[in-house]
Every structure is written in C-alpha cells, then in structure tokens.
Image (cartoon, rainbow, N blue to C red):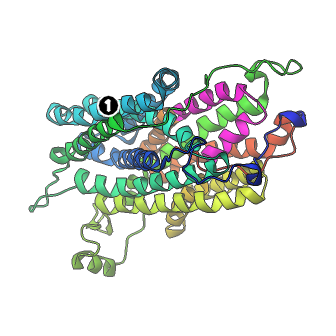
Amino acid sequence: MIAPEHQPTLLDPRLAPNRGMFVLEDGRNTLFTFVLLILLFALWGFCNGMIDVMDKHFQEELHLTLAQSAWVQFAHYLGYFLMALPAGWLATKLGYKGGIITGLLITAIGGFWFIPATHIGSFWAFLLGVCIIAAGLTFLETIANPYTTVLGPVQFAATRINLAQSTNGIGLLLGPIVGGMFFYSKNAAGESTGSENLWIPYAAIGVLTLILAIIFYFSTMPDIEMEDDYHLDNSMPHVSHSIWSHPHFWMAVIAQFLYVAAQAGIFSFFINYMTSQVPPVPSSWNVLGDSGWLGGWFEIHSDGNLGFSNKGASNLASLGFLCFLIGRFTGSAILKKLAAHKVLGFYSAASVVLCLLVFAKLGWISVISVFLTYFFMSIMFPTIFALGIFGLGQRAKKASSFIVMAIMGGAILPKLMGHVADTYDLSRGFIVPMFCFTVVAVYGFMWPKLSGSAGMHGVSTSRGH
C-alpha cells in the first residue's frame, strides 16, 4: 500500500491566488501564447486525422494489400517512437519556445517532402514524409501539453489543457474531410486524381508550420524552467527505486502498447470497412448524393450493390472522431465520479463486446458497433497513463516516457490485423483489437491489486494521442 503522504493530492482552488486563468504570478498575461498553442493542438489533430484516410488510397494506387498499406501507420508511429526521448531531452535544453520551433521546422520539412515524393511515386517516399511529420509532431505534443498547464494559476491547469484539447478534436474532425477531398478526388471523366493531388494538403501544412515558426520566433513566451524528465526520486528509501518493480507501471506499458495498437488498427482500416463490409445502402440514399448534399458519397461496388465511396467513407471517419470527442467530454465527467480503474475496465470490456459484434458480421449492428468503439476508446490513453504513473513521485517522469514510447504498438499490430483481413475479411480482422481490449480490461480490473491502492479519482482525459 502506498503511504498516504506519497499519494497524489488535489489542489484546493480556495487556497490559490486570485488571478485570472492566463495571468502569471508576476502579472504577465499569457492569453496570446495560449492562442498560439491551441493552433498547435489543432495542427497535430489535423495531421493525425489525415493519416487515417491514407491507407485506402495507397492500396488502390499502388495495388497494396491491407497488411502492406499498414506501413503507413508503422511509419507514423515510428516517428513518435524514435523522437519521444530526444524531444523530451532537447526541450530541456532549448526551452518551450526553442522546442516548439524545432518541431514546427521538422514538420514543415516533412510537409514539403511530399512534393518530390509525389513525383518519385514510390511507397517509401511517402512513408518517409509521414515519418518526418510524426517526428516534428512529437516535439509539439511533448512540449505543448505540459506548457498549457503552467500558463497561469495551478487551479486552472486542467481547464486550460482541456480547452486546448478541444481544438485538437476539431483538427481530428477536419483531417479526414480534407484528406478525402484530395486523396480520393476525381476529374470530370470519373478518373482518380488522388496521386496528383496528394501533395497539396501536405505542402499547405508545410507553409502553415513555417508561418507559425516565424510567429513563435518573434513572440515573447514565458519560458518557465522545465524539470529533468528523467530524474529518479531518491526520497523514498523504503520503496524500491526501480520503476519496473511496480507491476501497475509495467503492466500499464503493456496495456498502452495494446490499446494504441487497437486504436491504430481500427482508425487506419475504417475506410476499408465502410467500403467493403457495410450492407448495401438503400437506393433512395443515392438521391441525396445526386442532389449535392452528399455528392460523391456513394458508388456502385463490384458486386453491383450501392455502397459508400472512398470519399464518403473518409467523411464518415469524421463522424467516428466526433464520437471519440464526445467520449472524452463525457468520460471526463464520469472519471470525476468513479474510480479510474473501474471506468477503464468497463470501457475496455464494452470495446471487447463491440469488436465481437463486428467480427460476427451482423449487418448494420456491426457498423454501429464500429462507431461505438471510437466512443469507448476515447478515455483509454489518458486513463492508462494516469494509472501507470500513480504514486511514483518524481519517478513518474521517467515512467511516463516509457508509457509514451509504448505507442509503438500502433506501428506493429495493424499489420497483423491487415494480414488477418487479407486472409479472411476485415470483419474477421477485428479479432486483433478484441484481444488488445481484453488485456486492457484485465489491467483495469486488476489495478487495485497491482498498485496496492483502493483506487484513484479525478483523472483528466486531456492527455491523449
């Protein structure tokens, strides 16, 4: 059992100074800095949203299998994995401002790389661009998340980061829509122009990030000293100093690896599912498409039935992210009332059931189940994160770096899901995330025994990938 003096506590707002949400102790107003930061949150949400609609494009243009197209996710998460520790280390050297500018410049390089990559036309060239952009976004996520928490009084830290995360959700919603416009565009003859237009949104990202880098360079930003993220706490001699001796931590690393694997698989193959596994849609729906409101959403599939087009499915991906965003907002309220490990356990168990319903191929029930997985996945990343570092004191800083690095699961397991889908079909492929969610559920329900604590409340859902 963790000693009471080492358990996390909540700051009583009544004891904090009576200052505005964006006012530092010395009276400086940080609202402008915060506005700049929320642009970063929207930026990486937008980039992540576009990534999840690229797989189907490459499958068709380069004649790839589902397992082969999963290299897109591999390259994306590899960029995060490789830069997680360097970004944290470099941020301590350069400060908030220098770290953000570095991340923006790397992202710009990745965005502009798509121009020659389009001319090269090889899969590796596009994967390199995806990896470079992810490396730049790693800097932004590593720095912007904690930076929002120090731009004013402590009692408003959660409010500030939740406000910033709301713009991240907007970026996630817009990414698939814009990606669908360019990746699945067609000319007047009905021929795909996605290969020729793929570079456009990424070049625009390159221009935008350069502009932001210039703005940040000339902006005055309070550079509050960052602590060493990898300093070990030696103040508890009665507890082992190895973070790996705490089962609730190393099990969190495994749970996070598998959760991100499940998330990446469902996100990346969403368009494939909507265009191959959804039952035939009523012909009356096509009238809406012809009228212009849902123009280009439907097409006649190879089996002669009317179904969703790639563009329509990419727009539906935004609806999935809306479910994800709703899950975060409602989950935040639920986590204030119930123990975090119980919420994680029940949400993961619900996801297991939903994946089983998808696996069973029950028509529209399975389709609805796919959208509901977005809702129940929403709180998993931040909740696993919080449960994993619980009670570790200063050692939580080092522990958090390993939990963040566990997102490498998103690079590996989608290939397995793609292999199962290639062998059978995509509905059967949901057996992979079902297994992942099962392990996460076990971690949630076993957490009190693993940690030696009765439970924790008040987890923020603002952390998230």
Answer left or right for 127 relative to 432.
left
Tell me where residue 79 appears, x and y as whole percent: 42, 29
Say above or below: 332 vs 28: below
Q: Quadrant of residue 330?
A: bottom right
Answer left or right for 175 relative to 185.
right
**Residue drawn at 79 percent across, 41 percent down:** 447
Judged from this view, the residue extending furthest toward the left is: 189
Say above or below: 357 vs 293: above
The 10 Å Cα crowd at callout 1, few under 14, some 14 to 19, many 20 or more, is many
The answer to whether residue 261 of the structure is visible from this angle is no
Front-most of residues 41 and 425: 41
Tell me where residue 418 appears, x and y as whole percent: 44, 41
Quadrant position of the N terminus in the picture:
top right
Tell me where residue 77 appears, x and y as whole percent: 45, 33
Q: How many marks?
A: 1
SS category of the residue bearing label 1? helix
Report the amino acid beneath label 1. Leu
Front-most of residues 362 and 17: 17
**Residue drawn at 36 percent across, 57 percent down:** 174
Front-most of residues 451 and 260: 451
Judged from this view, the residue extending furthest toward the front is: 27
Tell me where residue 421 appears, x and y as whole percent: 45, 45
| Magenta span dominant secondary structure | helix
Q: Is residue 397 magenta?
A: yes
What residue would you read off at disc 1?
Answer: 105
The answer to whether residue 84 of the structure is visible from this angle is yes
Q: Magenta stretch? A: 380-409
Say above or below: 235 vs 151: above
Q: Is residue 384 magenta?
A: yes
**Residue drawn at 44 percent across, 45 percent down:** 33
